[in-house]
Amino acid sequence: MGFTRAELETFRDVEVPDLLPAAGQPLRLLFVGINPGLWTAATQSHFARPGNRFYPALLRAGILTSAIDPAAGMTDEDRDVLLRQGIGITNVVPRATARADELTAAELREGGERLRALVAERRPEVVAVAGVTAYRTAFGEPRARVGEQPGRWGASRVFVVPNPSGLNAHETVATLARAYAEAARAAGVLGSTPEP
């Protein structure tokens, strides 16, 4: 499945629903994107743009045991693989844009408040926010670095992990996998042995 630029533009500002285990089911690891891209909005599947390294990094980290290619939209089976492990996906800002830098600081701060409310309600073991620059703005932490953050949100540990977008060119699938595996081990999704 492919989209023309004009087709993708029709998905600007469309929201993508959170992928979360049913209420009452454990949420162990909550991945948080900055906001949906246009391809993600078109397919209603998180991190769906071809070339996005999120799912290849999950596979490399051992979080997934088989590849997921959401470019044409995730299947119910793909979603179930994540949900059965207690993995959820949401965004700081729910509206789709072509680039994350189209978001305002006010939108990021408002999205940060919404995310904290979701975390308070669902109480994941670990929250992994993908993107340090957006994290700094959304949560008023200008000196935040990638890795586990010093404070918790309630009982939830908080990690900042690298953004898997192809625009984040200095990261590779291998470096993303290491960061995602660290958060997954903290959440109990992966065993304690570090991945190679």
Image (spheres, rainbow, N blue to C red):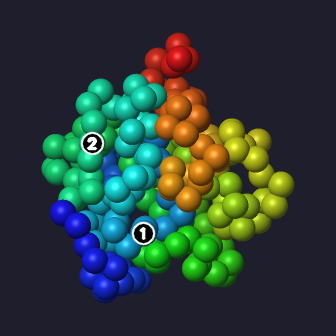
Q: Quadrant of residue 55?
A: top left
Q: CA distance from mark 1 to mark 2?
A: 18 Å
Q: Are marks 1 and 2 in contact (CB under 8 Å)?
A: no
Q: Residue at x 69, y 61 (%)?
A: 133
Amino acid type at circle 1 is Gly
Binning the other alpha carbons within 10 Å of mark 2 as few (below 14), some (14 to 19) or many (20 upward) gives: many
Q: Which residue is mark 2?
A: 68
Q: Residue at x 34, y 65 (%)?
A: 40
Q: Residue at x 29, y 27 (%)?
A: 65
Q: Is residue 58 visible in the rendered structure shown here?
A: yes
Position of residue 116 relative to residue 151, above or below, is below
Residue 172 x, y percent position in the rendering:
55, 39
Residue 186 x, y percent position in the rendering:
56, 29
- Badge 1 marks a residue whose secondary structure is loop
- Say whether disc 1 or disc 2 marks the residue closer to the N-terminus: 1
Amino acid type at circle 2 is Ile
The disc at residue 66 is none
Q: Is residue 120 visible in the rendered structure shown here?
A: no
Q: Which residue is mark 1?
A: 37
Binning the other alpha carbons within 10 Å of mark 1 as few (below 14), some (14 to 19) or many (20 upward) gives: many
Residue lying farthest top? 193
